[in-house]
Image: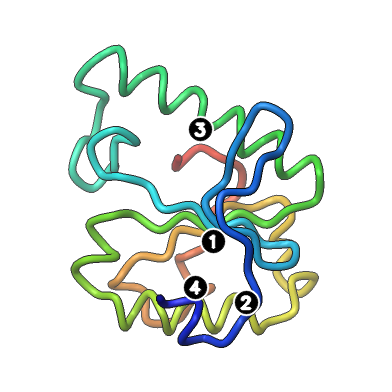
Amino acid sequence: KILQKLNVNYKKEVKFWKYRVDFLVEKFIIELYGSYWHCDPKIYPTPKNKTQELKIKRDKERIEYLQKLGYNIIIIWESDFYKSPEQIRHNLRAVLSSNAEDYNRSKTVALLREKDNTVLNSVITQGTESV
């Protein structure tokens, strides 16, 4: 519903080779990560089991593959989404409406955390080390 409220055109559950993404908005891929299975680092500093370890590895591979195709990746954690949907909507609007070249997001992963007041201040991290 957030994307509908932002009045952007998007596609749901788009397949890229062996990967499926949650949402595609132009050159942005938006992924909603469940806190447990994707091992949210705010909640789980280290993986608790092999399933989480495999999921983290697969997430990194998928992100790297999609970035090579030129897509900008936005990750929204489940805990943030439920805690601060308005902040997530605000951050998404700012990221989707800004100029991607200004921030070289084709090589970055965006983590839209609820505490980030300025979207691109501590929201964008280089590479995939924070995934």
Residue 121's tag is: 4
Q: Nearer the viewer, residue 116 or 59?
A: 59
Question: What element does badge 2 sit on?
Answer: helix
From the viewer's side, name the closer residue of 92 and 43.
92
User: Separation of disc 2 and disc 1 at Cα?
Assistant: 13 Å
Disc with the residue nearer the chain's start (2 vs 1): 2
Q: Which residue is the site of mark 2?
A: 96
Residue 119 x, y percent position in the rendering = 48, 76
Side of 101 relative to 34 (left or right): right
Three-letter residue code for mark 3: Asp
* Disc 1 target residue: 124
x, y percentage for residue 62? 61, 33
Dot label at residue 51: none
User: SS at mark 4?
Assistant: loop
Q: Secondary structure at mark 1?
A: strand
Q: Which residue is mark 3?
A: 59
Amino acid at dot 4: Asn
Q: Nearer the viewer, mark 2 or mark 1?
A: 2
Mark 4 surroundings within 10 Å by alpha-carbon count, few (fewer than 14), some (14 through 19), many (20 or more): few
